[in-house]
């Protein structure tokens, strides 16, 4: 039985989404950073970084949510893994890109508009994050100019990984109106039944 350590309202969500897309049996071992569970010795033996998610697939232990998803998509391929070496490279490219270019402004806006207590929020930091988000959003919108999904006409691990980060955009109060293709793409990705199942895990 695959074990996925984490809780849905965290980066573990993207791994739960992948497991649901693949239709794999798994156990979600509830491990919440907010309760200090990620700092317990028993969990630190699984992920010495003290973060979630972590995966245990019959003794193969992995951490880092994007790495977990790429591993699962390749090992248990149900059409989510790219069919060519070039597209494998693009799937890696988009997975790294969303973490290095898009996640930080999205999370910063989310923290300062929704998560932090009022006294710790900074409207200036949220506004700055919104401005910085415009550049990666334009890159994504441009990439979808001639294709339905990031690697072509079929939803793949590249779409899941990128959409799992941008799924926080509405809660972060970021505007997608200027990027209609990215907006439509995100709506289609986040409407997938597997994501709804993962959110209720």
Image: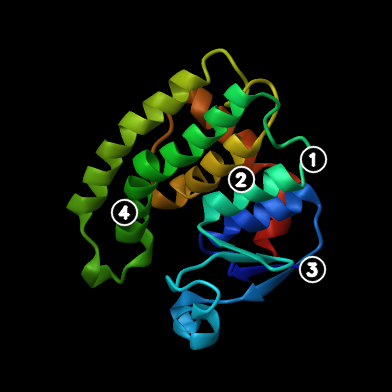
Q: Find the residue positioned furthest to the front.
A: 59
Give the x, y percent position of residue 1: 79, 68
Mark sitting earlier along the chain (3/2) = 3
Residue 179 visible to the viewer: no
Residue shown at the point (66%, 34%) measured from the top left: 156
Mark sitting earlier along the chain (2/1) = 2
- Mark 3 lies on residue: 1
Alpha-carbon distance for marks 3 and 2?
Answer: 19 Å
Check the picture and name the quadrant holding the C terminus. bottom right
Residue shown at the point (31%, 54%) measured from the top left: 108
- Up-down relation of residue 13 to residue 176 (above or below): below
Label drawn at residue 70? 2
Give the x, y percent position of residue 196: 70, 53
Alpha-carbon distance for marks 3 and 1?
Answer: 18 Å
Which tag is nearer the camera, tag 2 or tag 4?
2
Q: Are marks 3 and 2 in contact (CB under 8 Å)?
A: no
Determine the secondary structure under disc 1: loop
- Mark 1 lies on residue: 78
Label drawn at residue 108? 4
- Up-down relation of residue 182 to residue 100 (above or below): above
- Up-down relation of residue 190 to residue 32 (above or below): above
Q: Are marks 3 and 1 in contact (CB under 8 Å)?
A: no
Alpha-carbon distance for marks 2 and 1?
Answer: 13 Å
Which tag is nearer the camera, tag 4 or tag 3?
3
Q: Quadrant of residue 163?
A: top right
Alpha-carbon distance for marks 4 and 3?
Answer: 36 Å
Image side of residue 113 versus residue 78, left or right: left
Determine the secondary structure under disc 2: helix
């Amino acid at each position: 039985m695959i074990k996925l350590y984490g809780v849905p309202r965290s980066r573990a969500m993207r791994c739960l989404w992948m497991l649901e897309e693949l239709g794999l049996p798994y156990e979600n071992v509830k491990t919440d950073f907010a309760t200090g569970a990620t700092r317990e010795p028993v969990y630190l033996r699984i992920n010495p970084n003290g973060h979630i998610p972590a995966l245990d697939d019959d003794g193969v232990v992995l951490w880092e949510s994007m790495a977990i998803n790429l591993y699962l998509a390749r090992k248990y391929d149900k059409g989510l893994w790219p069919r060519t070496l070039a597209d494998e490279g693009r799937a890696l490219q988009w997975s790294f890109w969303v973490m290095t270019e898009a996640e930080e402004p999205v999370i910063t806006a989310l923290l300062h508009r929704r998560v932090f207590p009022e006294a710790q929020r900074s409207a200036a930091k949220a506004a700055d994050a919104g401005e910085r988000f415009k550049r990666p959003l334009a890159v994504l919108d441009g990439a979808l100019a001639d294709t339905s999904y990031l690697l072509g006409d079929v939803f793949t691990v590249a779409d899941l990984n990128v959409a799992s980060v941008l799924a926080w955009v509405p809660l972060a109060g970021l505007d997608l109106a200027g990027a209609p293709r990215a907006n439509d793409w995100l709506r289609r990705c986040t409407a997938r039944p597997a994501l709804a199942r993962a959110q209720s895990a």
